[in-house]
């Protein structure tokens, strides 16, 4: 179980996250929703310890994550994998090598520097790519893939870390509807088939309600909603987005269209 207690992050006088308290049982699929700047990304980055909390605690099992350092911190990041909006892949390298990068934290410094992959590592990477329909692209450079394909490669890279938690920060923000569905289906299958806890930041209320078992709404760094998708009423949507639920859904869909038009241009 992941427990977040009074978690706060300040940048100067600005509270990006302000006194968040959450308990996330193992195997949950949780959507973090809210407007841009609500603190969603900062929250995930603190859980992974890419950002250090200003105060509060992050506890997983009997481990206080917020105080980890050195090798223990690296071990936590291996068990709490991140999937980013911009994929963070090496476009000049092939798909298989990009996935194998998820194994670096399990290797010695010498082996990781020289990228001496074991046969077991390669088989695991290929098996994971096969699971998500990407094995045929193993030898292709990542820069030759579509955005949706690249995001599935990024998910495979996270999965070969053998994580207990996957944190996905706006994983479909720059994807078209078809690729968005493919990526969300991949995350859902990981959650249901492997029992891995998923926390995902999302703009679209429709997608959040369709895929997530629980929604946490942030506004100005604070939790203003925490419940089942069918409990997200127009009242709470107004609190989160300043508009009715239907309007916020239309706005998120319109944002996706604009982003895709920009990418095509």
Image (cartoon, rainbow, N blue to C red):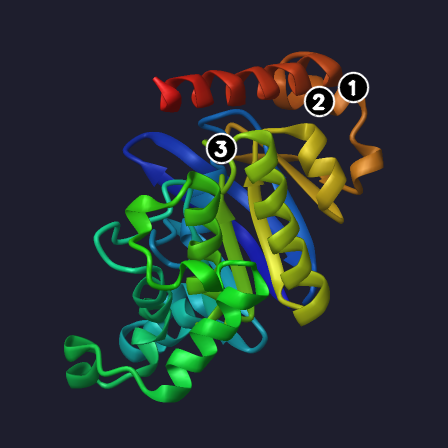
Q: Quadrant of the C terminus?
A: top left
Identified at 47% across, 35% down, the residue is 39
Which residue is identified by label 1? 234
Q: Nearer the viewer, residue 245 or 100?
A: 100
Residue 206 against residue 255 in the figure, above or below? below
Within-10-Å neighbours for mark 3: few <14, some 14–19, many 20+: some
Q: Earlier in the sequence, mark 2 or mark 3?
A: 3
Q: Quadrant of the N terminus?
A: bottom right
Question: Callout 2: helix, strand or loop?
Answer: helix
Residue 104, by quadrant, is bottom left
Within-10-Å neighbours for mark 1: few <14, some 14–19, many 20+: some
Q: Measuring from the top left, give residue 257's x and y in whole percent.
A: 52, 18
Mark 2 → mark 3, Cα distance in angstroms? 19 Å
- Does residue 225 appear anywhere in the picture? no
Q: Measuring from the top left, give residue 30's x and y in whole percent.
A: 66, 49
Residue 48 against residue 178 in the figure, above or below? below
Which residue is identified by label 3? 173
Mark 1 → mark 2, Cα distance in angstroms? 5 Å
Mark 3 → mark 1, Cα distance in angstroms? 23 Å
Question: Callout 3: helix, strand or loop?
Answer: loop
Which residue is identified by label 2? 237
Identified at 81% across, 25% down, the residue is 233
Identified at 72% across, 44% down, the residue is 211
Q: Measuring from the top left, give residue 159's x and y in whole percent.
A: 49, 67
Answer yes or no: do the residues labelled 2 and 3 have beta carbons within 8 Å? no
Q: Measuring from the top left, give residue 35's x and y in whole percent.
A: 53, 25
Answer yes or no: do the residues labelled 1 and 2 have beta carbons within 8 Å? yes
């Amino acid at each position: 179980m992941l427990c977040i207690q009074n978690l706060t992050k300040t940048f100067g006088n600005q509270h990006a996250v302000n006194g968040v308290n959450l308990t996330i049982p193992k195997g949950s699929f949780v959507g973090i929703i809210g407007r841009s700047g609500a603190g969603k990304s900062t929250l995930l980055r603190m859980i992974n310890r890419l950002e250090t909390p200003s105060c509060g605690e992050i506890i997983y099992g009997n481990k206080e994550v917020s105080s980890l350092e050195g090798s223990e911190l690296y071990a936590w990041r291996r068990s709490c994998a991140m999937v980013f909006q911009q994929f963070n892949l090496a476009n000049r390298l092939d798909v298989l090598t990009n996935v194998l990068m998820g194994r670096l934290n399990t290797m010695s410094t010498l082996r990781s520097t020289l990228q001496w992959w074991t046969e077991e590592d390669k088989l695991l990477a290929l098996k994971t790519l096969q699971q998500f329909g990407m094995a045929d692209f193993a030898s292709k450079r990542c820069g030759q893939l579509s955005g949706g394909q690249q995001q599935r490669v990024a998910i495979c890279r996270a999965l070969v870390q053998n994580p207990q938690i996957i944190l996905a920060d706006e994983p479909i923000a720059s994807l078209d509807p078809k690729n968005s569905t493919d990526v969300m289906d991949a995350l859902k299958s990981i959650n249901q088939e492997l029992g891995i806890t998923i926390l995902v930041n999302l703009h679209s209320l429709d997608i959040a309600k369709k895929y997530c078992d629980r929604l946490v709404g942030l506004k100005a760094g604070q939790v203003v909603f925490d419940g089942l998708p069918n409990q997200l009423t127009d009242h709470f949507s107004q609190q989160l987005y300043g508009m009715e639920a239907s309007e916020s859904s239309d706005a998120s869909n319109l944002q996706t269209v604009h982003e895709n038009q920009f990418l095509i241009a």
